[in-house]
Image: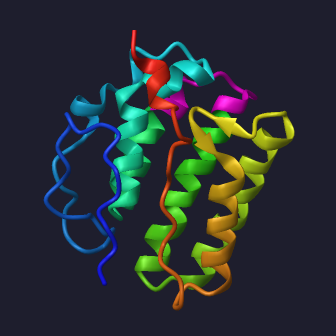
Amino acid sequence: MLDPAPERYCPEWHLPDRAHRPGQGQAGPALGAQASHGQGWDGRARALLAEPGYRFGIDLFNRQFYWEAHEVWEGLWMRAAKDSPQRDFLQGLIQCAAALLKASMGQGAGSASLMDKAARKLARVEEAGHTAFAGLDLASLTSNLADYRRSPMQSKPPRISLVHGALATLVP
């Protein structure tokens, strides 16, 4: 039985035709213009959920466009305040994407190292009192990442799901 397609969190933005793999041809069209590099984001965690680039990064990640998710989230990460939970959170997501990209390319050691770094970044956010951050259940993501790290050949790559009702907070 096939897995159902993951929910789209930013359906108004178009997914790439193919996933980029470094060293395997040119990257697809730049996502920067579409993602706007978080120019409208004010740096707050709650406002991050309203940022289309953040949600589009989740769409990309969940469809195994790991390079592309990394690129979109990096624009937001660059705008986050230094030493903030938002910056740690986004860096953790970026490292998750990079880890899964490396895993998909057969680079197990590099993938495992990045998964460990991602887990530490996300744990720092959780330790700061954020069990759900920007609509994302941190414990669920880190648990799924740990399961995948233990047995990548027997596990499906983790997906990111927003907590139930998170998007309802965006309705004016």
Q: Residue at x 56, y 42 (%)?
A: 163
Q: What residue sits 35% from the left and 58% below the top?
A: 6
Q: How far from the left and from the top, in percent, is residue 87?
A: 64, 33
The answer to whether 7 is drawn above or below residue 136 in the figure is below
Any part of residue 118 in sight: no
Instruction: Residue at 34%, 52% (x, y): give it.
Output: 60
Residue 25 placement: quadrant: bottom left
Q: Which residue is drawn at 63% across and 67% down?
A: 145
Asked whether residue 54 appears in the rendered view, the answer is yes
Number of dots carrying numbers? 0
Residue 84 falls within the magenta-colored stretch: yes
Q: Position of residue 123 (x, y in %)?
A: 79, 49
Quadrant for the N terminus in the image = bottom left
Tell me residue 129's x, y (percent).
83, 33
User: Who is closer to the viewer here, 154 or 34?
Assistant: 154
Toward which corner of the image does residue 19 lie, by quadrant? bottom left
Q: In this view, does 42 lie to the left or right of 112?
A: left
**Magenta region, residue range:** 76-86
Quarter that holds the C terminus: top left
The image shows residue 33 at horizontal and vertical percentages of: 22, 30
